[in-house]
Image: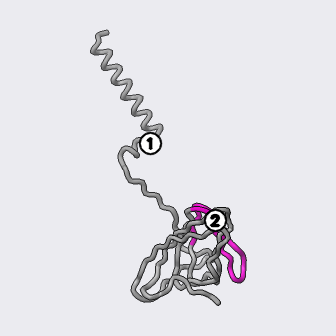
Amino acid sequence: MSLTHQKSMLKNIFITIACALMLCVPNIALAAESPVDVQEVFTSTKTIEGDAFTYPKGNAEMRLYRVEVQVGAEIPLHSHPAPLTGHIETGQLTLKKERGKSQTFREGDSFVLGVNTPPHTMGNTGNKSAVMWVSVASAEGVPTLIPVE
């Protein structure tokens, strides 16, 4: 067998192995093709109560908040006049309804609150600072929360 023929056979073997590896590990091939990674974190059509969303009337306005709550701290009793999505980046927060049960959200959890969500508090019941991102679909001039006395 000639040296040229041996080189050609080796080349074909390496190409076959490379193709087999790409089929076995498709993410390697995709990662090389796309430097951008988009992952949907959360989608919902209902609030935590199971209600459909209702939006305030007026000029639409989107808001994004980063809320940091220290250990043992609590956002006082309030309600929301517009739907919002919350996402816990770190720590844990417990939503306590004025009447009803509590719900604890941990790192990576997402949820939707709306106009029919009963008045509630949101407190850090964990052992480290909690960070929550809140996106609100509202209207100009409409507050994000309404304190309840």
State the quadrant of the C terminus. Answer: bottom right
Asked which quadrant contains residue 6, the reply is top left
Q: Secondary structure at mark 1?
A: helix
Residue 18 in picture, x, y percent from top left: 40, 31
What is the x, y in percent for residue 53? 53, 80
Judged from the image, the secondary structure of the residue bearing numbered disc 2 is strand
Dot 1 or dot 2, earlier in sequence: 1
Q: Position of residue 102 (x, y in %)?
A: 70, 74
Q: How many marks?
A: 2
In this figure, which residue is indicated by the disc labeled 2?
A: 92
Seen in the picture, residue 15 relative to 55 is either above or below; the reply is above
Q: Which contiguous range is marked in magenta?
A: 90-111
- Which quarter of the figure is the N terminus placed in? top left
- Closer-to-camera residue (100/141): 141
Residue 85 horizontal side relative to residue 121, left or right: left
- Callout 2: 10 Å neighbours few (<14), some, many (20+)? many
Would you name the residue on which mark 1 appears?
26
User: Given the current orientation, which residue lies at the most extreme top position?
Assistant: 1
Q: Residue at x 56, y 66 (%)?
A: 131
Neighbor class of circle 1 (other Cα within 10 Å; few <14, some 14-19, many 20+) is few
Spatial CA span between label 1 and label 2? 35 Å
Picture quadrant where residue 100 is located: bottom right
Residue 91 is one of the magenta-drawn residues: yes
Q: Amino acid at mark 2?
A: Gln
Q: Nearer the viewer, residue 121 or 86?
A: 121
At label 1, which amino acid type do we have? Pro
Judge from the rendering whether residue 77 lies leftward or rightward of residue 11; answer left or right. Answer: right
* x and y, in percent, of residue 11 in the image: 33, 23
Which SS does the magenta portion mostly show? strand
